[in-house]
Image (tube, rainbow, N blue to C red):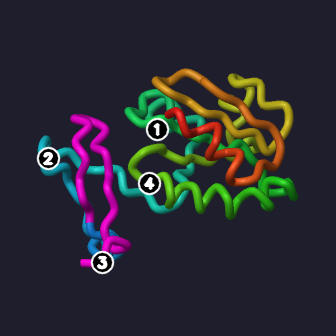
Amino acid sequence: MASSEVIEVKCPSCKAINRVSRIKVDSGLKPKCGKCKELLPMAKEALVVTDATFEQEVEKSSLPVLLDCWAPWCGPCRMLAPTIEELAEEMDGTIKVAKLNVDDNPKTASKFGIMSIPTLLVFKGGEIVDRMVGVQPKASIKEHLKDL
């Protein structure tokens, strides 16, 4: 199997590194950790979070989380969207990438003082460790995430 067809995914439960076939994942299979048998996080696109799912998906995540706070009417948000999706695929298994529509989820947006969009929040252990406001180049976002 070519190396581009295999990705390494760190298990959020036991921290074991697993080699996973991208072809099998693309066909719908859900891989489990070879060591502890927990399901591995295999999102290939940004996860949509809401006020109702925020605590479970972001604050209780075993992985660091990059949260894109956006709105559908926001031109800069739409410009940033492809970059967020690319990061979701590239960071798959190491950082969870999520999106929060601030218009539909005002409770969470208010909780974190989102005044301008797009705003990118970085969470680790349920706490904000970084904040970026405005459209950012992918390289800049990756620089903010490198130590996670």
| Label 2 SS | loop
Camera-side mark, 4 or 3: 3
Label 1 Cα neighbours within 10 Å, binned few <14 / some 14-19 / many ≥20: some
Which amino acid, by three-letter code, is at mark 4? Asp
Give the residue at x 22% y 35%: 14
Nearest to the observer: residue 14 or residue 48: 14
Determine which residue is flagged by label 1: 57
Q: Which residues make up the magenta segment?
A: 1-20
Q: Is residue 80 magenta?
A: no
First reached walking from the N terminus: tag 2 or tag 4: 2
| Label 3 SS | loop
Nearest to the observer: residue 14 or residue 2: 2
Label 2 Cα neighbours within 10 Å, binned few <14 / some 14-19 / many ≥20: few
Q: Quadrant of residue 1?
A: bottom left
Give the residue at x 20% y 45%: 38
Which amino acid, by three-letter code, is at mark 2? Lys
Determine which residue is flagged by label 3: 2
Please state the horizontal and vertical placement of residue 41, each as a whole percent of the image: 35, 50
